[in-house]
Every structure is written in structure tokens, then in C-alpha cells.
Image (spheres, rainbow, N blue to C red):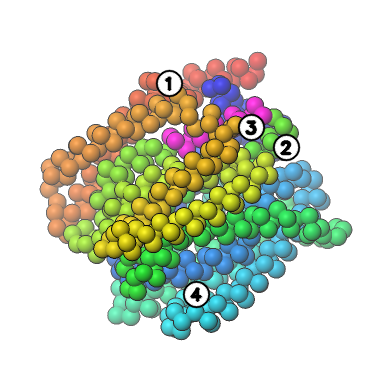
Amino acid sequence: MGSNMEEVASKKPSAPNGSSNVRVNVVINLIRTLTLTILSFITFPYVCRILGDSTLGLYTWVNTFVYYFLILAKISIPNIAIRECVKVRDDKKAFSHKVQEFFLLQAFMTLISFGLMVAIMASVPTFNDQTYMQLGFLLSINFLAGVFSFEWVYIALEKHFYIAVRSILTLALSAVLTFVYVKEQTEPARVLFVYASITILSTILTSLINCLILPKYVSFKKEGPYDFRSMLKPLIVLFFISFALTLYNETDVLLLGFLDSTKSAVGAYSVGVKGIDIIITIITSLYAVFMPRASYYYQKEDKQYFQNLIRYSMNITFFIAIPAIATMTTMAQPITALISGNYANSQYQDAYLVLIVLSIMMLTYSIGDNIYTEILLPSKREKIYLYTMLIGVLLNVGLSLLFALVIMPDHQTLGVAIATGLTDLLILIFLIYETREYALKAIFNLNNLKIIIFGGVIALLTYFLAPLLLKALPWSGSDLWKSYVLELVIMVGGDAIIYIGGLALTKEKLVSSFSPKHRKEMEEKNNG
């Protein structure tokens, strides 16, 4: 089974665009996501210092509100569009026709979503404040411009190198503009709107560039009638999934926003989950590589490659998530201090505890998303995920209110974090049970056990050695950040050597697959 996993990564199947190599695409996506992560880590602490917890909380809350209507505008069109476009991408005429159908549908839904957002903003008292109202309209440009992004077209075509280069350049420009124009001012609202304007710039640039290149792959000449009716049933299911998933992902922030009128709790919570969100983004972004292949293998009833692909992607999930959990739980305080830019005060109190509590979600949430993307979607069993997420939303709301108002009223941020982590674990258990035919073998195996063991080893080493290292470093007070940075660099570097070295010695398959000897053996096997 192990060698079959590596064949998935190296062999070129007779799929559409079969010359694409899964491993190469994974590496490209990983480089892209890591670069975007580094840029985010550079800009976010700076923004935290400039905006402060209350203004950052206001931005986060309004952005979350607008995000719900972004989901309504998409109604999961990108997911089903990728699945359907993969089937016809060798036929430019049929492919163009599919793209036209999905584009028109998304444009129509975006107009409805925007109209609904305007109506709700006009009726919610919070938006009587002009700052909230104007910020909401400004951020809504994200999903209005998103109609023309056509990102799903390039994913279906597996143009991962182009996506990576474009994403890095646009976000790098946004980062530069953030440092140039987001400055401390006597009017917090002014700097808030400058920052919000910069954040939507990448979406606008993405849409513009994608539209300029699109004619190379898609013709917008109408060829025959459009068949929207056949799309309705799967789109309705996927829409409710997206909406339920958005509710689930954003419930914690919205609840904290309503519980704390100052929005300080939201600011602290956003600092605590920032690192977690980044790791989850790194992992789940790789599923864009696997989804088209999984859909193809399942359609062709190639169960061996389908199972091996899932196992390979789960292997990557564990490989990234486990050491991230080990590092973030044991070094939560310096990490949140660096993220927030506050090194010697408690402005973002409870943030490091939120990071510790929710760190397990880097594994549980990623596995759940993997199951949905690579098993349930290709097999057209989306309804299972829909019911799971709806129950998850209700459970998360109930547990969050219980912990925040009854059990831990003095630490509502931490209470909501505990409720969210517990809910995510219960959701994962149910998803594994429902997809046990494929999920059990992909998750519970000796290879992943090796990863967990060495993750535990580096967690113990970091827990005992990091405090000693910090005491030995000379900086304190306003220069404490220097000690934190050096501490993280030394500990993460040491952990990486021990982690990868240990996995190499025990012949963990993902690490071993990159050795020259192993790659030569695989090439000989494939050629044979």
C-alpha cells in the first residue's frame, strides 16, 4: 500500500491533463501558501499594533458579517464547477459552455446576495453607525469583484503555477501598501478604511488578471441553450453546506461580538486563532490539487488510485498539522505576542490560551475538510456533510453560550474556544464513521503513528527547553520581541531537524519519498 501511495504522487495517470504531476502541484501550492503565510505574519502584527484590539475587532466583526453574503453569492458554485468542468476540459467548446453557465449563475446570485445584504444592513441597529455601514459596503466589493475572478476555471485546468505566481505578487503588493499607508493617526476610522481598501485590492487585481488571460482557455460565444435546471439540485445542497460551514466557522466571532460591545474579545480571539487559521489554510489549500484527481478517479471507478490518493493527502495533513500543534501549544505565549505586536502587556489577554485550546483543530478541521473534498464531493454524498455541519452549528452555539455565560463568564473568549474545539472533534468522529470505508485506512495507520510519536517528542523538548532558552537571551521590555523571535527560530529549527530526522530514520513514507535512492526505485518501477 505504501508504494502505491507514492505512485499516486509520481505516476502520470491517463486523466485529463494527465501530464500534470500531483507531487509537483502539491509543492507549487505549498510554496504559494507558505509565501502568503509569511507575508501575512509580517503584516498582521503591524496592523494589530496600529488598529488596537477594539478597532481590529470592529473590522473582524463587519468582515465576518459581509462574508456570509459572499458565501450566498457563491452558493458553492466553485466546488461543483470544478467537479463538472474537469469532465469536459479536453473539449474547449463543451468546457466554454460549462464556464458560461456557471458564470451567469454566479453573477445572478451575487446580485441577489448584495441586495439582501443592503436590506439587512438597513434594518440592523448596529449599522446605524456610519462607520459600520460604510465599512460593510467597502468590504462587499470583495464578493462583487469576485464574480469575475474565475479562479475555479484555473483550478479545474490545474494551472497551479500561474495561480501561485499571481497570488504571491498581488498579496506582496498589498503588504507593501499596508506598511506605506496604514499609519497611526488621531482618527482610528480613517486608518481603518485605508486598511480595508488595501485588503480588497488583491481581489480586484486577481479578477482583472484572470479576465485578461481567460480568453486563452474559454470562448464566450454562445453555443446552444444553457441548462441551469440540472445544476439546481446539487447547487442547493452545496449552498446549504457552504452556508452551514460559514455559520460554523464564524459563529465564535459573531457570538463574542454580541457578548462584548467593545469588540475587545473579538480582537483577542482573532489573535489567538491567527496562527491556527494559517496552518489550516496551508493544509486545505493543497486539497485544490487533489479534488480534480479524486473526482476523476471516482468517476472512472478506479478504487485503488482513489484510496491511495486519499491516503497520500491524509499523510500530508498529519505531516504538517502534528508538528504545528506541538510547537504552537508549547510556545503559545511568544507566538501570540509576536502576532499581536504586544510583548509586555495584556491588551490581548487570553489570546495564548485560545491558541492552546484550538490548536487541535489544525488536525481535526483539516481532516474533516479532506473527507468532504476528496470523498463526499466526488462520490456525490454531500448531504452527509450538510447534516453534519447543521448539527455542528447548533452544537457549537449551544456549547459556546453554555461556556461563555454559565461556566466561564469571566473568560468568555476562552469558553467559546473550548466549545468550538469540542464541537469540531465530535464532527470529525461522525465524518470518519460515515466514510469509514476510505477514511479509516487513510487516517489510522503505522505511517501516521510515526508522525504522532515524533510530534510528541518535539513537544516535550520544546516544553522544557524553550523557557530555559528564553531566560538565557538578553533582551527584555520593549526589546522582548527579539528574544521571542530568536527563541522561535532556534526551537523551530531544532524541532524540524529532530522531527524530519526521526521520520527519515523510521522510514516514514512521505519523507522517504524525497530521497534520491527511493525516487530512482520508483522511476524504475513505473518505467517497468
227 or 445: nearer the viewer: 445
Considering every residue shown, the one lying at the far right of the view is 224
Q: Are marks 3 and 1 in contact (CB under 8 Å)?
A: no
x, y (%) of residue 156? 66, 47
Q: Quadrant of residue 288?
A: top right
Q: Amino acid at mark 3?
A: Phe
- Residue 470 visible somewhere in the drawing: yes
Q: CA distance from mark 2 to mark 1?
A: 33 Å
Q: What is the secondary structure assignment of the residue under circle 3?
A: helix
Q: Residue at 57% x, 34% y: name it.
A: 436
Residue under pointer 4: 136
Instruction: Work out how far the residue at label 4 is from the one at label 1, CA to CA, in angstroms.
Output: 52 Å
Q: Nearer the viewer, mark 2 or mark 1?
A: 2
Instruction: Identify the residue shown where x is 55% and y is 17%.
Output: 521
Residue extent of the magenta highlight? 303-319
Dot 1 amino acid type: Lys
C-alpha distance separating marks 4 and 3: 43 Å
> Does 496 sit above or below residue 528?
below
Q: Which residue has dot 1 on it?
A: 507
Q: Secondary structure at mark 1?
A: loop
Is residue 243 covered in magenta? no
Closer to the observer: label 3 or label 1?
3
Which amino acid type is shown beneath numbered disc 2?
A: Gln
Find disc 2 in the rendering and name its residue. Answer: 299
